[in-house]
Image (cartoon, rainbow, N blue to C red):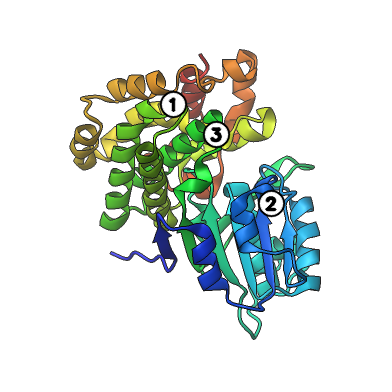
Amino acid sequence: MKYYNPVKISFDTICGEELSKLSGIGKKRLIFCYDGFEKTGTFSTITDGGENDLVITDVEENPSIQSIDKFLKSAHNFKPEIIIAIGGGSVIDTAKVVRFGLYLNRSSVKELLEGGVTRISGEKPLLITVPTTHGTGSEVTMWATVWDKVENKKYSVSDIENYPDHALYDHRLFSTLPMSVSVSSTLDALSHSFEALWNKNSNPVSDHFAFESIKLIIKYIDDLNDPVPADVRKGLILASMYAGLAFSNTKTAAAHSISYPLTLNYGIPHGIACSMPLFPLLKINSKGMVDKLDRLFMNCEVKSPEELEKKIKAAVKGKVPFSLEEFGVKENELEGLVGQSFTKERMANNIIELDSGDVRKILGDIYK
């Protein structure tokens, strides 16, 4: 058994104080943050807007290759010693790609994807990630998702050298998170955990993190209502971190593969797109994870996949759409999605091999 994750974690910390300790004095810092964060009190404790800081706030949701190329050019000119990412998965993934481009001295995402990995001398910029949604897990993984919105394709920039150095979790940064994002990011973490459990690359350590994540999500998701109680928010942040630690070693599988065309073609938020297929997949994958089912059902206080599906759907009802029909997908379009749902490096991780008929049935099951 092998498990590896080098990210140093500070949980339930005060972001501003911890960043001050880690980033030192007089260092050149490139700060990626979500739009609006620079108006918060936390931002003012991090930077005074001096010439040593370059702040970027116009990160796209599902960041495109074209937008990251622009940021990479700015980063090459600025030459940061430290990169700080404060935001959801899009912000953190953008920072990770830019940091990797600097490390390999590449001027574009295309060069990163096609040019192979040639090391250069010198240190990588220190990368500090501060998530503000409890779902992505990007703060503790080595890969970053980028999207070619011209060719309608999704890519992953991945290398063992691209784990962040530090991940900071401050529940205060989640206080203004909209309910729809709170729910969809929680569902993203749930998907990461299930995908780690029914994965060919799973091991006892990744399984432990996945089980703990699912247990926390089931415990707290019913109480995810405005205003979100502090213990609920902290519990879901911890669940997201556990999920990230789980799939950081297994990668994702069929649910994520099926989700990509749903996001590309219909704009379905990632956390919802990758969690809708979970329950049909649980029924399919159960025969490949018989040894894990008792613990899973005990943690969730259910006796069957159907009961678990009912529990989750009841918790999210009225908060986010949770069927393809609600997102404007036409039933006659499902067949065309089948072929697009097969991302080789994701489907290959699923413990049960799926064919086109299986995927067509899954899409039908989540249509209404």
Using the image as rendered, state which of residue 27 and residue 337 is in the foreground: 27
Outermost residue toward the bottom? Answer: 121
The kind of residue on which mark 3 rests is: Val
Assign a secondary structure to mark 3. Answer: helix
Q: Is residue 79 above or below residue 185?
A: below
Q: Residue at x 39, y 31 (%)?
A: 281
Q: Quadrant of the N terminus?
A: bottom left
Q: Position of residue 279 (x, y in %)?
A: 38, 27
Q: Position of residue 150 (x, y in %)?
A: 79, 42
- Mark 2 burial class by Cα count in 10 Å: few <14, some 14-19, many 20+: some
The kind of residue on which mark 2 rests is: Glu
Q: Which mark is residue 198?
A: none
- Mark 1 burial class by Cα count in 10 Å: few <14, some 14-19, many 20+: some
Q: Which residue is mark 3?
A: 181
Q: Which residue is mark 1?
A: 225
Of the residues tagged 3 and 1, which is closer to the observer? 1
Assign a secondary structure to mark 2. Answer: helix
Of the residues tagged 2 and 1, which is closer to the observer? 2
Using the image as rendered, state which of residue 216 and residue 251 is in the foreground: 216
Instruction: Measure the alpha-carbon separation of dots 2 and 1.
Output: 27 Å
Q: Which mark is residue 38?
A: 2
Q: Residue at x 48, y 50 (%)?
A: 137
- Mark 3 burial class by Cα count in 10 Å: few <14, some 14-19, many 20+: some
Instruction: Measure the alpha-carbon separation of dots 2 and 3.
Output: 20 Å
Q: Is residue 222 above or below residue 182?
A: above
Mark 2 or mark 3: name the one nearer the start of the chain.
2
- Count of labels shown? 3
Using the image as rendered, state which of residue 164 and residue 167 is in the foreground: 167
Mark 2 or mark 1: name the one nearer the start of the chain.
2
Using the image as rendered, state which of residue 222 and residue 245 is in the foreground: 222
